[in-house]
């Protein structure tokens, strides 16, 4: 039987609330709120084209003002440092400090989720694919940015000796192709 949109919505809301509570518990020693943890985790996973205040706001779906407050808190706790872009002095780049990276690693691996996924009754791979498919469908329907990785981006271009971003025409290191990107676009049909 097909599950109704309402049932799926309720399930996703419950999942999100549980994961948020677990994240809040882990972030408590640093006194971080869930939105601040989300920003920290985003900056730990995004690539060099995506570490700006505007990209953080777009990813979190929040306003410029709210994002600015969130980033100020991370900066005041020495988890984040701001720097001017070397090529365009008007652009601010956000870099996690080593303290921020260490905390992000701890927060990214939620023990509660790890434990649930280790149960034999759950197939983590197909679950991930199903949820990823739903996310992409929602992004398409709402016209939101996809924030995917190079692997699924229409701009990824094989080049002599490696890979190139076809949008920026810059070479990509292998580890960069696994980071999320504000400029990501799915292949066109
Ligand atoms: S190939 Fe796509 S995802 Fe990768 S850096 Fe370029 S625009 Fe971003």
Image (spheres, helix red, strand yellow):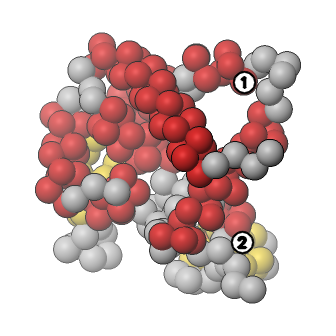
Question: Is residue 17 found left or right of 110 in the rendered image?
Answer: left
Q: Nearer the viewer, mark 1 or mark 2?
A: 1
Residue situated in front as seen by the camera: 16 or 10: 10
Compared with residue 182, is residue 8 higher up or lower down, i.e. above or below?
above
Q: Could you tell me how many numbered marks the image carries?
A: 2
Where is the N terminus found, in terms of image quarters?
top right
Question: Is residue 169 found left or right of 143 in the rendered image?
Answer: right
Mark 1 is surrounded, within 10 Å at the Cα level, by few (under 14), some (14 to 19) or many (20 or more) other residues, namely some
Asked if residue 17 can be seen in this view, the reply is yes
Label 1 sits on residue: 117
Where is the C terminus found, in terms of image quarters?
bottom right
Please state the horizontal and vertical placement of residue 107, each as a whole percent of the image.
47, 26
Residue situated in front as seen by the camera: 125 or 155: 125
Q: Residue at x 45, y 20 (%)?
A: 22
Q: Residue at x 48, y 70 (%)?
A: 142
Disc 1 within 8 angstroms of ligand 1 (CB)? no
Ligand 1 sits in which quadrant? bottom right
Q: Which mark is residue 163?
A: 2
Mark 2 is surrounded, within 10 Å at the Cα level, by few (under 14), some (14 to 19) or many (20 or more) other residues, namely some
Please state the horizontal and vertical placement of residue 171, each as a whole percent of the image.
62, 73
> Of helix, strand and loop, which one carries label 2?
strand
Which callout, 1 or 2, points at the residue further toward the start of the chain?
A: 1
Question: Is residue 185 found left or right of 83 in the rendered image?
Answer: right
Question: Is residue 189 found left or right of 15 in the rendered image?
Answer: right
Please state the horizontal and vertical placement of residue 180, each as a whole percent of the image.
55, 57
Instruction: Give the distance between the C-alpha atoms of the residues marked 1 and 2, in whole angstroms.
Output: 33 Å
Please state the horizontal and vertical placement of residue 92, each as a whole percent of the image.
24, 63
Disc 2 within 8 angstroms of ligand 1 (CB)? yes
Q: Which mark is residue 127?
A: none
């Amino acid at each position: 039987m097909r599950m109704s949109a309402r049932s799926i919505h309720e399930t996703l809301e419950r999942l999100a609330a549980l994961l948020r509570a677990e994240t809040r518990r882990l972030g408590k020693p640093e006194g971080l709120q869930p939105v601040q943890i989300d920003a920290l985790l985003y900056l730990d996973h995004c690539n060099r084209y995506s570490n700006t205040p505007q990209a953080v706001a777009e990813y979190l779906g929040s306003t410029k003002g709210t994002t600015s407050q969130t980033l100020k808190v991370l900066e005041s706790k020495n988890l984040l440092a701001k720097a001017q872009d070397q090529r365009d002095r008007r652009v601010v780049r956000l870099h996690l400090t080593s303290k921020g990276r260490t905390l992000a690693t701890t927060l990214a691996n939620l023990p509660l989720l790890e434990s649930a996924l280790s149960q034999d009754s759950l197939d983590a791979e197909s679950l991930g694919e199903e949820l990823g498919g739903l996310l992409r469908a929602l992004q398409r329907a709402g016209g939101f940015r996809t924030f995917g990785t190079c692997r699924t981006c229409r701009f990824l271009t094989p080049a002599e000796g490696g890979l190139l971003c076809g949008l920026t025409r810059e070479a990509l290191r292998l580890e960069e192709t696994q980071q999320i990107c504000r400029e990501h676009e799915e292949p066109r049909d």
